[in-house]
Each structure stands twice: as C-alpha cells, then as structure tokens.
Image (cartoon, helix red, strand yellow):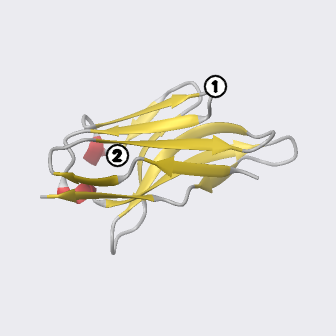
Amino acid sequence: QVRLVESGGGSVQSGGSLTLSCAASGDGYTFTTMGWLRQAPGKQRELVASITKDERTTYDDSVKGRFTITRDNSKNTVNLQMNNLKFEDTAVYYCTAKAYTWNTNEFDSWGQGTQVTVSS
C-alpha cells in the first residue's frame, strides 16, 4: 500500500516563504513522477509542479520563478520550496506520486493535504 505524508504547511504573510515536504512509502513500490497539486476554495485542483525520477521539472506558469521542486530518490521524498508567496497561493496542497509495483500498472496516489495560508 502506498502512503504519502506531507508536512510544512502553515500561515505566512505575503512575500514570505514556506517549504513543503512529502515522504512516499510502500513496500515494493517504485515512485516515478512526483509533484504537488493545490486546491483553493471554490476552485478546481491544479498541478503546481512536478519532477520526474531523472529530475526533469515542470511548473504552472503562476509559480514559475517563485517555487522550486526537488526530490531525493534514495528517500522517496519531494520538497516544494515556495518563495515570494502571494495571497492567491492560499490553498490546500497535495503531494502526488505515480507508483507501480511488480503486479500493477503505474497509478496515481495522493496525500491527505496540507493547508497553506498567505495573508496580504
């Protein structure tokens, strides 16, 4: 069974920084692309950033130049460094990972989410 555990959310003033962390676990599973989604009140969930196993990254245009995604393949962790936070970054942030094991196709998994609140 795959489990994703996020940490690092909280409240910060506009212009501040936060770092989100996520640890993926699951006996026998391989984690490929990992990333972060977010969902603001009344809005659809959107992909913020993703990183492949060979560390190719993609970012939503709204966070380019402010957020940085990194991963540690030896620990199956992914981090999201968020700088110059804006009010509109307020959302619940979800860690996501594609995973597979010997008897499955690749599938998507998500964490429980962590709240990020940016005050203006």
Asked if the residue under mark 2 is in contact with the one under mark 1, i.e. CB atoms within 8 Å, the reply is no
Judged by depth in the image, the label closer to the viewer, 1 or 2, is 1
- Graded by Cα atoms within 10 Å as few (under 14), some (14 to 19) or many (20 or more), the crowding at tag 2 reads few
Q: Residue furthest right?
A: 103
Please state which amino acid type lies under the numbered disc 2. Answer: Asp
Residue 5 location (% of width, % of height):
57, 50
Which quarter of the figure is the C terminus placed in? bottom left
Residue 54 location (% of width, % of height):
57, 24
Q: Secondary structure at mark 2?
A: loop
Provide the residue designation for mark 2. Answer: 60
Give the residue displayed 59% in from the left and 46% down from the top. Answer: 97
Q: Locate residue 112 relative to residue 31 in the image: left or right.
A: left
Res. 74 mark: 1
Please state which amino acid type lies under the numbered disc 1. Answer: Ser
Residue 29 location (% of width, % of height):
76, 40
Give the residue displayed 34% in from the left and 61% down from the top. Answer: 91
